[in-house]
Image (cartoon, grey):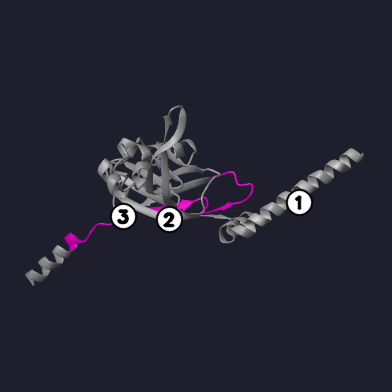
Amino acid sequence: MIRLLLATLLCLVTVPVQGEEVVLGMSQDEVAITATFDGSNILVFGAVKRETEIPDSALHVIVTISGPSQPVLVRRKENIYGIWANRDSVMVDAAPSFYAVATSGPWEQVLRETEDLRHKVSINRAIRSVGAPMDVGDPQSFSEALVRIRTEQGLYQLLEKTVAVDQQTLFRTAIDMPANLTEGDYITKIFLTRGGEVVSEFETSIDVRKVGLERILFRLSRDNPLAYGFLALAIAIAAGWLASAAFQVIRAR
């Protein structure tokens, strides 16, 4: 009887206490790219569900949106006898076409370096570059150049202190997505951190697709490039003929 009681108490002690979980909502989970598409603003909001009392340490929230990853060839130009030419090149194995990171506080306070290494949250960690040619010096500079260029294009964004957290329970933020988006699934992740450590993680996706005439032309250019070329030529000829006919009508008046 005593052994049974001790075993029961041991089981009760070792049952893990349910931690904090994310209940997420978004203004839209689909983005349609049309001929007039000029970008989109995604509102991400949610709440923290917990079974226990609120811990004493401050709660921070990190929201990331990552576009489809693909290899990228990065070239470095050098001035050779007055002519700028491509010199060295490094193939970055996988780089997201779009990556945004929004945080509720300064980056160094919301996530430790070891946690960033584990979860690959920061922009630099999201890019995977395994190796580089032996004759290339400072291969890390190629990844840094890729980040710099895409940041200037609005494709990579670090948005510190843009996530509002109310009473350690409700959170919300808005992320702008530019017009030059790549089709695919955009993975959205929410990280809850305390003391720089991730205590909970949630993942969903946003479907970004071309629709209407844009999608028809896009698929035609990929599936049948020859037919797409003839179609583009026919449209150019027709546009030229219509412009010429309109000009003649105007002159006749």
On whether residue 223 falls in the magenta region, the answer is no
**Circle 2 or circle 3, nearest the eye:** 2
Image side of residue 190 versus residue 212, left or right: left
Q: Position of residue 133 (x, y in %)?
A: 32, 44
Residue that label 3 marks = 51
**Closest to the observer, 197 or 5:** 197
Mark yes or no: residue 248 visible: yes
| Residue positioned most to the right | 253
Q: Amino acid at mark 3?
A: Glu
What's drawn in magenta, residue-wise? 12-40
Measure the C-alpha gap from mark 1 to mark 2: 46 Å
Q: Residues within 10 Å of mark 3 (few under 14, many from 20)?
A: few
Residue that label 2 marks = 204
**Closest to the observer, 238 or 84:** 84
Q: Residues within 10 Å of mark 2 (few under 14, many from 20)?
A: few
Which residue lies at the image location 91% right of the left edge and 40% below the top edge? Answer: 252
Q: Earlier in the sequence, mark 1 or mark 2?
A: 2
Measure the C-alpha gap from mark 2 to mark 3: 23 Å
Number of dots carrying numbers: 3
Q: Secondary structure at mark 2?
A: strand
Residue that label 1 marks = 238
Q: Position of residue 84 (x, y in %)?
A: 46, 32
| Residue positioned most to the front | 81
**Circle 1 or circle 3, nearest the eye:** 1
Residue 230 numbered mark, or none = none
